[in-house]
Image (spheres, grey):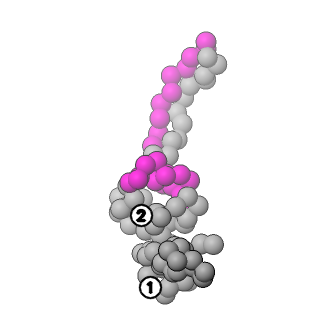
Amino acid sequence: MEKICKGDEVIVIAGKDKGRRGTVRARVDSEHVLVEGINVARKHIRPNPMKGIVGGISDKEMPIHISNVAIFNPATGKADRVRIKVEQVEGGRKKFQRTRVFKSNGELVRV
């Protein structure tokens, strides 16, 4: 189970967008995430009339390393760390349920 998942609200703790908040759109790989409105690069597009491309300058969201973001805790209003809470399921011998909880107050991250 990953500590930061798609749909989580995160806050940037390092880099040019430090202090800004956004929602995770996707996980690019195990170490990079795509956050809405964060790490935006300007991309110059050459016009191509054969393909119907107009051209110009567009904004593109680039992946950010997972170590540069922390999950946002709405109860405290600050960045927080996540731990995985493992509980045994009733009636099962080796069945476990994993849930993500905030380290500071122990509340569930997102249902």
Q: Is residue 61 above or below residue 57?
A: below
**Magenta-drawn segment:** 22-50
Residue 104 is labelled as: 1
Q: Residues within 10 Å of mark 1 (few under 14, many from 20)?
A: few
- Residue 22 seen in the current view: no
Q: Which of the 4 image quarters holds residue 109?
A: bottom right
Vertical arrangement, residue 2 with respect to residue 62, above or below: below
Decide if residue 72 is on the left or right side of residue 14: right
Q: Residue at x 45, y 74 (%)?
A: 84
Number of on-image labels: 2
The residue at the point 49 percent across, 87 percent down is 105
* Relative height, residue 103 to residue 21 (above, below): below
Of residues 52 and 86, which is closer to you in this image? 86
The reply to whether the C-beta atoms of the residues labelled 1 and 2 are less than 8 Å apart is: no
- Please say whether residue 95 is one of the residues in the magenta stretch: no
Work out whether residue 108 or residue 88 is closer to the camera in this orientation and state it.
88
Magenta-span inclusion, residue 30: yes
Identity, as a three-letter code, of the amino acid under mark 2: Val
Q: Quarter of the image containing the C terminus? A: bottom right
Nearer to us in this view, 54 or 106? 106
x, y percentage for residue 56?
A: 54, 29
Give the distance between the C-alpha atoms of the residues marked 1 and 2, in whole angstroms.
17 Å
What residue would you read off at disc 2? 69
Decide if residue 76 is on the left or right side of residue 16: right
Q: Secondary structure at mark 1?
A: loop
- Residue density around tag 2, few if under 14, some if 14–19, many if 20 or more, within 10 Å: many
The label on residue 87 is: none
Give the secondary structure at mark 2: strand
Number of the front mark, 1 or 2: 1
